[in-house]
Image (spheres, rainbow, N blue to C red):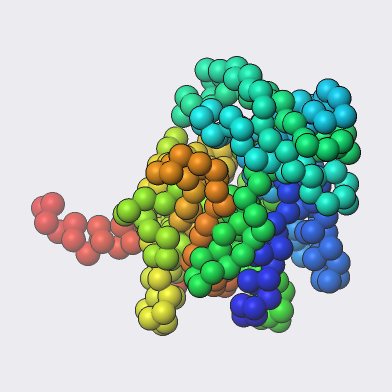
Amino acid sequence: MDTAQHRDWLLEITSLPTASGREDRVEAWVRRWAKRHPSIEILADASGNLTVQRRGAASANPIYFTAHMDHPAFVVTELLDARRVRAEFRGTVHEKYFAGAAVVLYHADLPAQPGKVVDFDNRPDKDNFGGNDSDKYLVIAFERDVVAAAGDVLTWDVGQARIEGDRLFTPACDDLAGLAAAISAYDTLLADPAQDGVDVRLLLTRAEEFGFIGAIAAMKHGTVPRGARVIALENSKSFPESPIGGGPIVRVGDFTSTFDPGLTYRVGKIAQQVAAEDASFRFQRKLMAGGTCEASVYQSYGHTATCICLPLGNYHNMNEPEGRIEAETISVNDYHGLVRLLVQVARWLDDAKKAPDLRERFDGLYERRKRVLG
């Protein structure tokens, strides 16, 4: 695998300004990458979710790697005067982080324009997952006249993406690092002639941070066919028992639900095989109940789904011990491990030896031991 290229893509993609409903810069990057591969096509459903697949792909049980294209951020709703805009914050960040916070506004191809939050209107939403979200409307002020329009994206001002040692510090790991891993793994598979007949697809969704709206829409549109195996990619809040640097995490569930046991088992067995062949490869297997991810959506709509995630620091840019907004952070080695694991999942998921079926294992155990029942 071209790890240098994958690292560069990680830096590029996680630097892109994006917000729920305003994922156009990420989509443009994906479309530029896809033009390098005439063997693939990009299909957009009625809600703008993107499917990347080989041309003419058709199988009863395709493998989907999914990632969302947005990150918690501000979207301009109104220009108040030459130096102030009103914006909606789309995502989950606690109220205490907003007052006086530094932000940057992105308009077309102009350089980022720095500003700060000067007013805040919090409207609780009692129907959200986890009970701590709300509709947030803010006034952003600028020291100079600003060039802006409704729909422009503003992000926290946390500096440029950078790598220090094994750590990536960047405005938006969640879920742009997952998307970068999906692209890197897919690019690796496209370069392998032995994988030409394997039906692996990418589903890149919109507005996850605003309530999984893109993923729900994809389910309602029938974007993912019945019989597909869906592996959601995420960045999930790290805890002491799920450390950054401990490897990508085979995620058995989230705050809301647990995932398909059979598919989770098979992905875990593949991870074990990779670790057995290479002592430098590390992985974890955890519940990760710090948030809800799209795998819960796919499961609830009747699909076979699980999740692999990267342990994440400063979840949604919140440095909770310090009480301030900072860059999100992941381990670069964890990221490369995720790419490698995805490549092997694509190659081995239908190999009964590498990824045994859980029910068949139980049936075999029963046949061998049922004598004890009389």
Residue at 31% over, 54% down? 241
Residue 253 appears in view: no
Residue at 39% over, 65% down? 246
Q: Is residue 112 above or below residue 280?
A: above
Residue 173 appears in view: yes
Residue at 66% over, 64% down? 11
Looking at the image, residue 174 sits to the left or right of residue 195; the answer is left
Looking at the image, residue 235 sits to the left or right of residue 245; the answer is right
Residue nearer the viewer, 94 or 13: 94
Residue 18 image offset from top left, x and y in percent: 72, 46
The N terminus sits in image quarter: bottom right
Q: Is residue 188 above or below residue 30?
A: below
Residue 207 image offset from top left, x and y in percent: 68, 38
Farthest front residue in view = 143
How many labels sit on residues?
0
Residue 225 image offset from top left, x and y in percent: 67, 47
Q: Is residue 107 above or below residue 282?
A: above
Image quadrant assignment for residue 282: bottom left
Residue at 45% over, 48% down? 237
